[in-house]
Amino acid sequence: MRIRKYFLIVTGGLLLVAAGCKKLDLGPSYQDTDLSFWQKPEAAVQTLNNCYAGMYSDDYFFFNESLSDNAFCSSPVNGGAVQSIAAGAYDGRTNRVAGEWAFHYGGIRNVNNLLANIDKVPGLAADLKARYQAEARFIRAFHYFHLVNWYGNVPLIKDEISYDESFNIGRSPKADVVSYILSELDEVTALLPLRSAYTEADKGRITKGAAAALKAKLLLYQSRWADAAAVLEGILGGTYGTYTLYPSFSGIFQPENENNSEVMLDLEFVPVQRTQSMQRFFIPFTEGTLITGMAPSQSLVDDFIMANGKGINETGSGYNENTPFAQRDPRLEATIIHDGSSFVTKRGETVTIRTAPGTGDNAVDKADASPTGYYFRKYYDRTADGNNNSGLNLILLRYTDVLLMYAEAKVMLNQMNEDVWDKTIKAIRQRAGFTDPAALSYANYAAIGNTAMINMVRRERRSEMALESGRIFDIRRWKTAETVLNGTLYGMKVGTSNLAVNRRVFDAGKHYLWPVPQADIEMNNNLLPNNSGW
């Protein structure tokens, strides 16, 4: 297939031909011409599978945590220089800033290519073609969702464009792009199957539920609380398919439980054929094979509440700094590895991880080990090979996120009540392993006031969704990034004080949006003016 010279806003003419979805054929073969490729019956599904494979990046998924207050990236190159971004030392030439833009526009180009040519594919049943088109349009909407969150106003490209047109296209207002995404999601929701309609071979494909959940998230990000709540109530009520909390919190992220009752959308991998090896950056150094590239922060550890529902600094919490991990939120142990944690290696051996200074190769004072004294346990795949190549899927949307979005929408409308609480926070905590009525009963929180309730719901989201890529978007949309991303990032306590690991800088006047990549501006001045402060 002739490589098309589509729009130059994709730096370097990026063409995504990443490895495909689970057990699905990829295409096209670039030995084919455009015409001959689209005359093949398998052309549509192969191209769609390429679109799936390029929907998101495992690198971005994990290293987004280090852009937030959840984690520190210890390498200046990992994640496209996220260390520099977190320190406020970046611009339109920074790898991640330019790469994110190119990645998503490459994905949009692939979708537009499919939609422009799918009618040429012989023998494609009408119902299957309609489904493929809906899946592709969702993927395009997913790309635009990320683009508007990072850059604000962006070029809105709905169809294939020519080489010449790429020099002249400008940026559309964010509001127009958001309206387009919402309209697309409404239309594809009507066309996509329910989750239950897919065969075993097609598990992992996009569903009505995924489209509804992405729409709700976009509405929530625009502070359209009532509109978001209405969509979320439809999901809770089963309008878009049946989803339930998976019984085990830690089990959600294990390969034997992929595509479980909670998963609404994921980035699919399969051992040997298509793998990701990101865990090598965040599990204990003795297991990871590489420098510990991402380490949890003390701030994240401290935000996990006590088993009685109180924050560690609240009166009556029972927190003891000499035994800081006792009587804590069960999700803390399921998410974080700390000094004294039990850990099962890929060899099946149960070991105790020591991170205090002078305690071994995983210790905070050892070169290449965690600089914070913490590692991540979540998303650790024991079935990965010796180089930590894993077939574990990465979950992009899950039902607990829906419940947390609903709780947030209702509390922002000042409509939190016992019914909403029981459906959301109580259910989530019960699944996590809380048993103390003090943490589960709405009566214990009803009088705290709406501001405190908002903060409680936000804290619940942070604890539940850590290492799932969303924290950076949350603190940006809440406009709290200027508070939590300015100052020192701390690690574990050593002696009488916590380790000072890194200095963070967030300028509220410019950092809530990334700049348009400089290379793209140099090719097309219509992308100007740049975002405020850049």
Image (spheres, grey):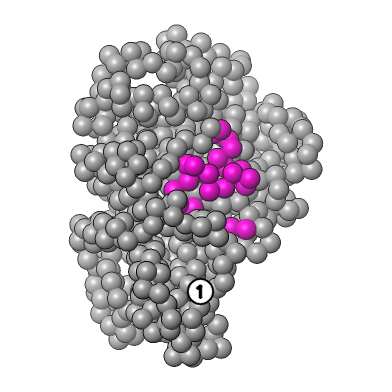
* Residue 513 among those drawn in magenta: no
- Amino acid beneath label 1: Gln
What residue appears at the point 41 percent right and 50 percent down from the top-left corner?
88
Tell me residue 441's x, y (percent): 38, 16
Secondary-structure class at tag 1: helix
What residue appears at the point 32 percent right and 38 percent down from the top-left corner?
237
* Residue 258 among those drawn in magenta: yes
Q: Is residue 217 left or right of residue 297?
A: left
Q: Is residue 333 left or right of residue 159?
A: right
**Foreground of the two, 29 or 103:** 29
What residue appears at the point 27 percent right and 68 percent down from the top-left corner?
156
Is residue 102 depicted above or below 233 in this figure?
below
Residue 266 in view, yes or no:
yes
Tell me residue 190's x, y (percent): 29, 58
Tell me residue 475's x, y (percent): 36, 41
Is residue 256 depicted above or below 141 in this figure?
above
Q: Residues within 10 Å of mark 1 (few under 14, many from 20)?
A: many
In this picture, which residue range is highlighted in magenta? 248-270
- Image-quadrant location for residue 34: bottom left
State the residue lying farthest toward the top.
Answer: 316
Which residue is disc 1 drawn over? 46
Q: Quadrant of the C terminus?
A: bottom left
Q: Is residue 84 left or right of residue 192?
A: right
